[in-house]
Amino acid sequence: MNRKIKLIWDFKGPDGLETAKHHCVHLKEFAQIDNLPFDEVNYKELNPMHTYAYITVDEIHMKVFRDALKPHRGELA
């Protein structure tokens, strides 16, 4: 069974929410253009000044996403 990895991009400041929403569009586009499997693309607002966008992928595909998209951090999903 493959572990799931959540790759995360942090956006801070008053425009962080809208930037994270827009980043999700690009994450989906990247996966679709390169025909890469993913489980989820979404964002989460932690507070009005910190939102993050993320994509959840199988561990075996994580390096492709990580190397191409340079996430700020990652964690087990």
Image (spheres, rainbow, N blue to C red):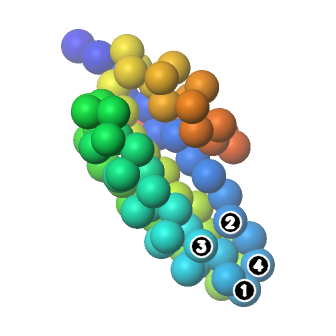
The residue wearing badge 3 is 19
Q: Of the residues shown, which amino acid type is indicated by label 2?
A: Phe
Name the mark nearer the viewer: 4 or 3.
3
Give residue 34's position: percent from left, percent from top.
33, 33
Give residue 12's position: percent from left, percent from top.
74, 70
Most foreground residue, 32 or 46: 32
Asked which secondary structure carries label 3, the reply is helix
Q: Residue at x 57, y 47 (%)?
A: 8
Q: Of the residues shown, which amino acid type is indicated by label 1?
A: Pro
Report whether 41 appears left or right of 74. Answer: left
Which part of the image, by quadrant, shows the C terminus?
top left
The residue wearing badge 1 is 14
The residue wearing badge 2 is 11
Give residue 73's position: percent from left, percent from top.
65, 39
Name the mark nearer the viewer: 1 or 3.
3
Residues tagged 3 and 2 counted as in contact (Cβ below 8 A): yes
Q: Residue at x 65, y 75 (%)?
A: 16
Most foreground residue, 44 or 38: 38
Q: Of the residues shown, which amino acid type is indicated by label 3?
A: Thr
